[in-house]
Amino acid sequence: MLKPIPDHSPTTVEVVPSRSFTYHPPTAAYGADRILIKPNLGYPVGPPATVSMGVLKTVLEGVRHASPDAEILIVEGVCSPVSLAEIAQRNGLLGLLDEGMRWLDADQLPLKAYPNRSPKPVRFPSMMAPALLEEVDCRISVGALKRTHLKGQPLISACLKNLYGLFPRSHYKARSPNSRGQLHRPSVPQILQDVYFTLGHLFDGGVVDGDQKYYSANWKPDRGQAVALGKVIFGSDLIAVDRTACEIGDEPMPDYLGAIDCLRAEK
């Protein structure tokens, strides 16, 4: 169910107060049989290090309204010794699910190699990820807005970086079995270009939980400070959504967003 990379003509991104957030899903969600939601729930802590259950609940309600009979799959791969089952229970995910929704651990799903469709791959000619991604009709990334620092440089996590959780740790681990160290070489901003052109371009929509922005002075993505923003940002193009989230969060624009836009223009 792979689709061509869209031409990405100007894309509408909605920015709404989090207290009045109502989700309008992408066109692909309407009448879909199977929908995949990838939330940022990789750590056994609450928001803003992970997506709030309030924002995720609203996304699920919007998707269910768009497709009342769809099977909705919440897929995540953790970055912690704590299992996804435990994180789902701690964070309250299980209470959000109706009979047609279920959560799946990305690390336990059958895999396939997705070709890197970038005109200039950084490192990976293809990347391993769940085969399920091409077996659904609609894919939505629901990220938390976070800034950490890696090798002295700020790193923004929103819709695109959220997709790291779809890559199997067994394949991409380095020194730690709980992380995906291979995806940090030569650098995360560079590898995010490969992530977009293997998986990111398949996604039909993205949501950034900007009710609070997470800020860490170091690399730790689960121990930092919260900065109130009170916004939710969403749209059909992950890069446009992430760009708007950086603007709303008063964050420096990551170089990889511009690099991906330039590479998309070459397609």
Image: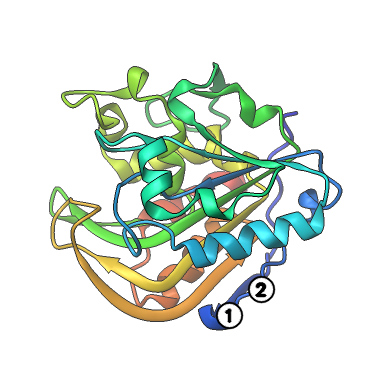
Name the mark nearer the viewer: 2 or 1.
2
Q: Would you identify the image quadrant in which residue 147 lies?
A: bottom left
Vertical relation: 48 (above or below) 116: below
Q: Position of residue 129 (x, y in %)?
A: 51, 25
Q: Position of residue 123 (x, y in %)?
A: 37, 26
Viewport quadrant of the N terminus: top right
Graded by Cα atoms within 10 Å as few (under 14), some (14 to 19) or many (20 or more), the crowding at tag 2 reads some
Vertical relation: 151 (above or below) 137: below
Residue at the location (58% across, 61% down)? 57
Q: State the residue position of label 1.
A: 16
Relative to 28, 145 lies left or right:
left
Q: State the residue position of label 2.
A: 22
For residue 125, say whether it is visible. Answer: no
Viewport quadrant of the C terminus: top right
Q: Would you identify the image quadrant in which residue 253 lies?
A: bottom left
User: Which structural element holds mark 2?
Assistant: loop
Relative to 254, 223 lies left or right:
left
Nearer the observer, 98 or 61: 98
Residue at the location (44% across, 63% down)? 52
Q: Which mark is residue 49?
A: none
Residue at the location (68% across, 65% down)? 10
User: Which structural element holds mark 1?
Assistant: strand
Graded by Cα atoms within 10 Å as few (under 14), some (14 to 19) or many (20 or more), the crowding at tag 1 reads some
Residue flagged by tag 2: what amino acid is it?
A: Thr
Vertical relation: 2 (above or below) 236: above
Nearer the observer, 30 or 163: 30
Residue flagged by tag 1: what amino acid is it?
A: Val
Residue at the location (41% across, 60% down)? 144
Q: CA distance from mark 2 to mark 1?
A: 8 Å
Q: Position of residue 206 (x, y in %)?
A: 58, 56
Discs 2, 1 touching: Cβ within 8 Å: yes
